[in-house]
Image (cartoon, grey):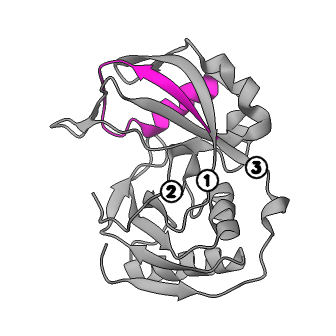
Amino acid sequence: MNAAANTLGPGCGPAAEQLPEMVDVVFALTGGSLPRDFEWPLYREIARVLPWLAKTPRTGVLPLKGTRTADGGLMLTHRARLVIRLPRDRVCSASALERASLRVGGATIAVGEGTFRKHQATSTLYSPRVTTGEGDEMRFMAVIEEEIAALGVRGRILCGRRVEVQLEEGRNRVSAFPVAVHDLREADSLLLQRAGIGRGQPVGCGLLIPHKTIVAAE
């Protein structure tokens, strides 16, 4: 992370109980490699199996972990997991994804059995990419500060090096930044995980996860 950091004070946004409880549903995943900018095609395939997903706010697919290929794709390892953030009352509905085959570009991936995990409150939350539509770091930070303060959250924001993401297939790539929010109280940590920040949450942008330390951009 670079030196762009700011401390937020309390706001007057919605309390945590006004948002549905969100959980992360984790599926085993097998396949070869995924093409560059696979995120939207993957989400579209998941929404084909779970059509209610696209109509449910604050849901999305967390960034997949794997080894990047020379052309910018992602090689899936035996430890690859598909993680979808969704309301807890949709966990049973999400089981329809088990044993599904998803066609992403020229690749076919198989989804295994799923489990879910409740969110844990940690003092630091992190997302490897957050986008607001702003390419300038200072303007980006101002938007995120305002958004988080409106939730009534106190925290210290650190912003990493700019990256680019594609929010929808066929659209231009947009600027995004890795973001960590540090020094969070327990209630604020849970609220941010429920709400997310920025836009592009279907493809994993702004979906915050616990992190032990402030880390630099990948």
Please state which of the two labelled residues, at mark 3 or mark 1, is closer to the viewer. Answer: 1
Q: Which residues are magenta?
A: 24-48
Q: Which residue is mark 1?
A: 120
* Residue 36 occupies quadrant: top left
* Residue 94 occupies quadrant: top right
Q: Which residue is mark 2?
A: 210
- Tag 3: Cα neighbours inside 10 Å, few (<14), some, or many (≥20)? some
Residue 115 is left or right of residue 181, and the answer is right
Image spot of residue 34 (x, y percent):
33, 28
Query: What type is the residue that disc 1 sits on?
Result: Gln
Q: Earlier in the sequence, mark 3 or mark 1?
A: 3
Residue at figure coordinates x 74%, y 25% from the top left: 93
Question: Can residue 29 be found in the magenta stretch?
Answer: yes
> Element type at marker 1?
loop
Residue 19 is left or right of residue 59, and the answer is right
Query: What type is the residue that disc 3 sits on?
Result: Glu
| Mark drawn on residue 97 | none
Image spot of residue 91 (x, y percent):
72, 31
> Element type at marker 3?
loop
